[in-house]
Structures are given as structure tokens and as C-alpha cells.
Image (cartoon, rainbow, N blue to C red):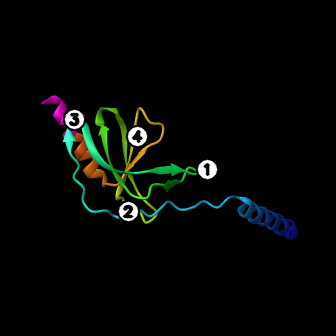
Amino acid sequence: MKSIYGLALALVMGMMITLGAAAPQMRDLPVIKKLSTYRGDHYPGFAEFRVQDIDFDDFGMLQLTGNEPYDMLVNVTYITTVYRFEDAKKTDYSTLVFTNYLEEPILIRQPYKDVVSSIRKAMEGLVK
């Protein structure tokens, strides 16, 4: 009886090792360095953000593709979702913003609270 359990355990362990070696290795998220404070302009319905080009690999992992962040004027009325983005070191110097006119999110190289504050200021300009 002991030999049957030992054989079954060895077989299961062998399958786990084989499957682990055959499975593709997941890469870590990129490490995103902290940039200096950025205060973009605000207009009624629009806010200026510091944006970085990104792409997603076959496994859905985010990759920085642009060399440098650049300024972008965004119509905040089209923003649907805002996420605090944590990189591989669990720092949150960037924010992922989804809009209803782009399929992929925009990576804004500003902290979440700064992005939300800019969106709020731009929306307040609409009601004044």
C-alpha cells in the first residue's frame, strides 16, 4: 500500500515539474520611476496630463514603449475609469485611465490623487 502512495506521489510531482517547465514564464511588471511634480493646465472639460506610451504583451503584461513622457490634453468627460497603477516594486507613481473612445488605457505618469484632482478641476470648470 505504501508503494502505491509513493508511486502516485512521484507521478504527481513529475507531472507538476513537467508542466512548470513547459509553461511560459511570466515577466514582472515594469518598474516606473517617480517623476517630478507636474501641474498641467485645466480648462472647462479638459485637463493636461503627463502621458507615457504603453503596450501589452501576449500575457497582458504592461510594457513601456515610449522613450519619454509627453503632455496630452484629455477631454475628462470621456473618462470612464481611473485606476491606481502599482509597478513591480509596489509603488504607485502612475495611473491607468480608461476612456470610452480608446480600446486600451492611457498610462498617466502622475500619482492617482493628482489625476483625480485634475479631473475634478476640469469638471468644475464645466459647471461655472
Q: Which residue is mark 2?
A: 91
Dot 4 or dot 3: first in sequence order is 4
x, y percent for residue 125: 16, 34
Q: Residues within 10 Å of mark 4 (few under 14, many from 20)?
A: some
- The residue mark sitting in front, 2 or 3, is 3
* Left-right relation of 50 to 6: left
Q: Residues within 10 Å of mark 3 (few under 14, many from 20)?
A: many
Dot 4 or dot 1: first in sequence order is 1
Q: Main secondary structure of the magenta part?
A: helix
Q: Which residue is mark 4?
A: 98
Residue displayed at 82% across by 69% down: 6
Q: CA distance from mark 4 to mark 1?
A: 20 Å
Q: Which residue is mark 1?
A: 58
Which residue type does callout 4 highlight? Phe
Q: Which residue is mark 3?
A: 123
x, y percent for residue 72: 32, 45
User: Height in image: 12 above or below 120?
Assistant: below
- The residue mark sitting in front, 1 or 2, is 1
